[in-house]
Image (cartoon, grey):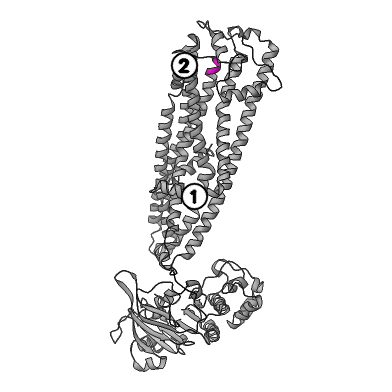
Amino acid sequence: MFGGQDGLRRIFSQDTLKVTRVSDTLKRFGGYFKPYWPLLLLVAVFVIASTWTQVTAPDVIGQVVDCYLAPSSASGFSFPGAGDSETTAESNCWFRAGHEPESLTQTVLRGLFTLGDFPTPPDNSADLTPESRIAGLGRMIAIVIGLYVVGAVLTGLTFLSMTLAGQSVLTNLRVNVFAHLHRLSLSYYSENEAGDLMSRITNDSETIQQAISFALINVLSGILLIVWTAYNMLVRSVPFALLSLAIAPVMLFATNWFSSQARKAFRKTREEMGSINAELQEGISAVREVQAFNRADENIEQFKLTNAANRDANIRAVAFTSALAPVLEGLGYIALAVVVGVGGMILLNGGELWGTSVSLGLVITYLAYVQRFNQPIQQISILWTNLQNAVAGAERIFNVLDEEPGIQNRPNAKDIPQIRGEVVFDKVGYEYKSGEPVLNGISFTAEPGKTIAIVGPTGAGKTTIINLIPRFYDVKSGSVKIDGQDVREVTMESLRRQIGIVLQDSFLFSTTVMENIRFGRPAATDEEVIAAAKLARADTFIERLQDGYQTVLGERGSGLSQGQRQLISIARAALADPRILILDEATSSVDTRTEQLIQQALEKLLAGRTSFVIAHRLSTIRNADEVLVLNKGLIVERGKHDELLAKKGFYYDIYMSQFWRGEAPEAVPTEASPNGQGKLTTAFSQN
């Protein structure tokens, strides 16, 4: 039913996630199914019809006995004290010509049985001939087989229809989440891990998919089958039904108890497996230290203890899952024994139970009913966790969709026209956390076509400044204006379309080199892409690649050096032809020769554009029109490179730490500055 022990292990090993807003989540999730209501209507019809076949087949099997196999004591099925067995059997055979159908089911089955003018069983069983018995038996068996076949087909159509609707809903849901993630501001990503967001799109969606495609249908059809079966049993004989279902509560309790214990045990196995992974990671990563200090034996003993704990936890978990099926099977046999025992006693004592007639056919019908009744109990108990997890997964997804972007276009925002490139910071203040300012009263003006270099120690606020220009964040005080327009008053799309950014670690996609460069302007022609690559000095190494511009790159540009990735990133920015260009540590992680190539490319790219350069190496910003020196969120110095050196202030200290001492930035010691303006760390790394 669930794929054997492996299936049960997989189901029980899932954590039961806590749901806080069940009704709201279900209502909202149901809204996604509205466009697919015809499919849902089909699913409902198929579920009802397939359940009908399951509860009807036992009735027909009972009729086979009461109408043809043992219609009277003359058939050989006589019991001591059962003098009226003929009357009892015949009264339960509702296929007889003299019996009026009592329900729609009986009418339908009677109609199927009499197709082609086939005769119904006679009112008096003594009139049955061997030939009529065989013919009637064959007709009823054909009906039973037909019910099973139709039920199987309907069940398959049910799962197919629900899968079509469910997959369509999940496709739309994933697209909505993915699109919404692109609208969220950078502050959201600084507070939420990428792995958790990916889990909501993949793992939570997969949980919902399993619930929709399998668990939901099984639970709903199981509930309907239980209710319908119990109703049929109670209609035929209330006392016999209650006695036959006496074991059902015990089965429900056993299923819930074993399921609960198994989940607790599997939760423990996950914890122990986490300990094993931690031990492995630590042991492998620290193998040099372990060997150097001769600690291998102690580490091995510790790993043995952790591994043994994991073994014990797994054995305990498997013990519960392995015990569930035999326990339920044993209880099922006890339930069948109760039906046979009670039914046999009734038949031996005249076929009457508190005023209700009981025949051999009815006993056989109840045997099948009990089997039908017990099976969904196990299904519902086990799959209920899947449904809980699916609702919790949907809630987690909706939590993402409910997240309001921190940066949005204002209602009256207008597209910014072609910009000249004047950028003005007017007393700008910003803080990521309340009460912890990162920028304090930053003011400067960048004239069109000029290059502004921003330098300072880690945490000074350099990256924050450039993030305010394309409005990745909004200022807390003051304003940022481009060509006299506050960036908060224009649409983000029109603003960012005219701003290019080259980062220290530019992201390359797993596609061709051509498409990676074209990412800067999707409508660009191949010739324009190649021209941008030549401007960025990237064409030389690209042409040496196996397929040139059509070479498919690995994940994040694997297979290319850091410098080559930077050149492609510069080509991408050149293709976009931005009016404002931002370079964030563009040459910090490359060798000197590659830096020279990048510098040559940047000189062409910077020409005629307003540019902001965060530099890790001072050589990058020597030709800047103005250098802004930041420390602790304040501009402590400003001017040209030579002017700042002549002042012998904070900038001079940074310069001397790299060039006069001949040290690379990474090797700059953390010493107090002689002028008391703070400590020097890696002088030009981003914050």
Task: Give the structural element (helix, strand or loop) at label 2.
Answer: helix
How many numbered markers are drawn?
2
Residue 35 in the image, given as x and y percentages of width and height: 55, 50
Is residue 223 found inside the magenta-colored segment of the image? no
Q: Residues within 10 Å of mark 2 (few under 14, many from 20)?
A: some
22, above or below 503, in the image: above
Q: Is residue 298 left or right of residue 589?
A: left
Looking at the image, which residue is at 63% across and 78% down? 528
Of the residues under marks 1 and 2, which one precedes in the sequence? 1
Looking at the image, which residue is at 43% across and 25% down? 247
Q: Which mark is residue 318?
A: none
Amino acid at the residue labelled 2: Val
Most foreground residue, 664 or 43:
43
308, above or below 279, in the image: above
Q: Nearer the viewer, mark 1 or mark 2?
A: 1
Q: Which mark is residue 31?
A: 1
Distance from disc 1 to disc 2, alpha carbons, whole Å, reads 50 Å
Residue 206 in the image, given as x and y percentages of width and height: 51, 50
Quarter placement of the N terminus: top right
Residue 8 in the image, given as x and y percentages of width and height: 49, 40
Is residue 358 found inside the magenta-colored segment of the image? yes
Amino acid at the residue labelled 1: Gly
Q: Which residues are magenta?
A: 356-362
Most foreground residue, 425 or 18:
425
User: Which residue in the structure is indicated by mark 2?
Assistant: 342
Looking at the image, which residue is at 53% across and 84% down? 602
Asked whether residue 540 appears in the rendered view, the answer is no
Residue 547 in the image, given as x and y percentages of width and height: 67, 72
Most foreground residue, 608 or 112:
112
139, above or below 413, in the image: above
62, above or below 486, in the image: above
Q: Is residue 194 left or right of residue 118?
A: left
